[in-house]
Amino acid sequence: MNWLLLAATLLLIGMAGIAIVNVFTFPRLTRSTSQPRAPFVSVLIPARNEAGTIGLALRTLLAQTWPNFEIIVLDDHSTDDTARIVTQLAAAEPRLRLLPGQPLPPDWLGKSWACHQLAQAARGDWLVFTDADVTWQPSALAAVLAKMNRTQADMLTVWPTQHTQSWAERLTVPLISLVTHGYLPALLVHHTPWAAFAAANGQCLAFRREAYDALGGHTAVHGEVLEDVTLARLAKQHGLNLRMTDGNGLINCRMYHDWLSVRNGFAKNILAGYGGRVSFLLLATLFHWFVFLLPWFGLFFDSRFWLPVALGLAVRALTAASAGQRVLDALTLPLSTLLMTRIAAQAVWWHWRYGGPEWKDRRIIIPNHTLA
């Protein structure tokens, strides 16, 4: 029992150390009033069955203070009112246009194909890819571009402030900030060339056009579920300046709305996050049980387990506070761990049964899929 206590404690001290350093070093978007130059920006949105969110997203983008931009929405064969909503808004707004999606080629996955078409149609010197459920404060686009100018970033990823309402969202979505702020040292992302420290969030990815082209664009990641992370790794490998920043309330997102969308959304990506290897996902699940569940059971046998319990709650609370989440929800960490285990099981079932996940009425078959 003593070695379990010691190992869990040391691991959580390491996470706490990363989280504390990130509190002071993880960049945040800030409002920018200076605009030394205003290059033309293309804001690019892939959309499939986004009628519930696309209108609000576009209205917030059209209210941006940045003076020189276009918005292109690609309708990826939606079966709802997505295209109609965009068309109505575009009729009164010349900066907005709708691009009908072309059929999916062999060996491409849907989002990369949509983003590739958007990039081909874009006229901007800078490209900003964002999702149809992301909302922008009026100064947000200017803040993104100012951050890129200040840091000389070739690629900038923004982690939007996540908004949650249902219990399924509150138990799972804030774990994104637990990973980004508790596992990933921002200083290593920004100041080392190692692809292992590459991170990205496809909800908001900004590129200088020449950097995007140098990477090969989305053609280079055409078969990747985590096309955003793969682009970040390629940026490192090409010696480009990769940066990330917290949205800090300027860029916001409500990813999911109920348990089904939470389960399917996370299950779509979780296995790809471990290289598509079931064995790696299993090891990660066991690791999280060890640090976030075992100490609670250990309390029944040894009161000293209060230390890793407290450390786990502290890491969860600190990363929540840092990312603008509910701090008291940290108390649900054991339940969150069990819920993510259920999501991992869903991903494994899809992997073994179908060869890939399901998302928005599509079966995503991974190119060169193997039952790893």
Image: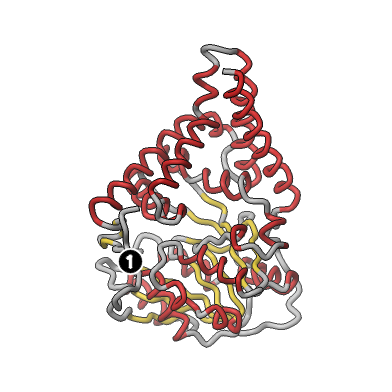
- Kindly identify the residue that appears in the image at 60 percent across and 29 percent down: 8
Q: Is residue 135 above or below residue 16?
A: below
| Residue 275 placement (x, y as % from top left) | 44, 56
| Residue 221 placement (x, y as % from top left) | 45, 72
- Kindly identify the residue that appears in the image at 48 percent across and 30 percent down: 334
Q: Nearer the viewer, residue 289 or 175?
A: 289
Q: Is residue 164 above or below residue 312?
A: below
| Residue 82 placement (x, y as % from top left) | 33, 69
Judged left or right of residue 166, residue 175 is right
The secondary element bearing badge 1 is classed as loop
The amino acid sitting under disc 1 is: Asn
- Kindly identify the residue that appears in the image at 76 percent across and 80 percent down: 36
Q: Is residue 39 above or below residue 139?
A: below
Report which residue position mark 1 lands on. 368
| Residue 204 placement (x, y as % from top left) | 54, 65
Judged left or right of residue 165, residue 193 is right
Q: Nearer the viewer, residue 115 or 49?
A: 115
The mark tally for this picture is 1
Q: Nearer the viewer, residue 174 or 91?
A: 174
Coloration of the structure image: secondary structure
- Looking at the rendering, in which quadrant would you find the N terminus? top right
- Kindly identify the residue that appears in the image at 37 percent across and 50 percent down: 267
Q: Pointer 1: residues within 10 angstroms few (<14), some, or many (20+)?
A: few
